[in-house]
Amino acid sequence: MLKKVFDSTLYYYQKSYDLKVKYKDPILFLQYINFGDYYRNQKEYDRALDYYLKAIDNIKEHSVNSIQYNYLYKNIADLYGILGDKEKQNQFETVFTIKEGEIAANRSESMDYALSIIVDDTENRYETSEKKNISGFLLEL
């Protein structure tokens, strides 16, 4: 039964890829990732690696924001490790680690910015509330 599910999966991945090619859509990285995942699950590591590398190339070629696809570098490193190429494994692990650091820095900057907006808004509300309280107090006098 499991073999049939994987065959069906591959069929639909191929159909998706064929349609994108038919309509000349150059953005194919998601299809390449799907093929890579499929072949990795089938333990066809060379094929999986080829598709993951195509995905990375397609992402770069079309200037896609690759932050959410950083895990591909880790997948590639893992496959190189399985295939016994420790040098390339280390290269891709290094890229993955550097990009993870950049992602963490960007998240930190975004969080700092969001927190500053919240603090500013809270301070403005407090000041407005205080002014209303003082105005109300003065009117009562």
Image (cartoon, rainbow, N blue to C red):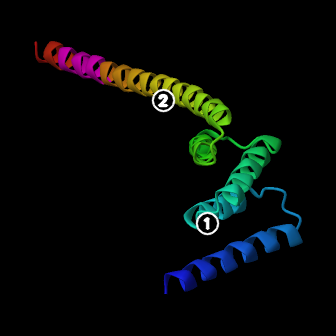
Q: Amino acid at mark 2?
A: Arg
Residue 86 location (% of width, % of height): 62, 35
| Residue at the image point whose x is 18% and y is 19% from the top | 133
Locate residue 102: give its quadrant: top right
Residue situated in front as seen by the camera: 16 or 115: 16
Which residue is at the far front? 84
| Residue at the image point whose x is 73% and y is 51% from the top | 55
Q: Amino acid at mark 1?
A: Tyr
Up/down of 10 relative to 110, above or below: below
| Residue at the image point whose x is 51% and y is 23% from the top | 105
How many badges with numbers are in the image?
2
Residue 58 location (% of width, % of height): 78, 49
Up/down of 77 relative to 125, above or below: below
Q: CA distance from mark 2 to mark 1?
A: 31 Å
Locate residue 126: give its quadrant: top left
Label ID, residue 27: none
**N-terminal-most mark, 2 or 1:** 1
At numbered mark 2, what does the secondary structure look like: helix, strand or loop?
A: helix
At numbered mark 1, what does the secondary structure look like: helix, strand or loop?
A: helix
Front: mark 2 or 1:
1
Up/down of 138 relative to 34, above or below: above
Whether the magenta-drawn stretch holds residue 103 is answered as no
Q: Mark 1 = which residue?
A: 38
Magenta highlight range = 125-134
| Magenta: main secondary structure | helix
- For this view, does 114 lie left or right of residue 78? left
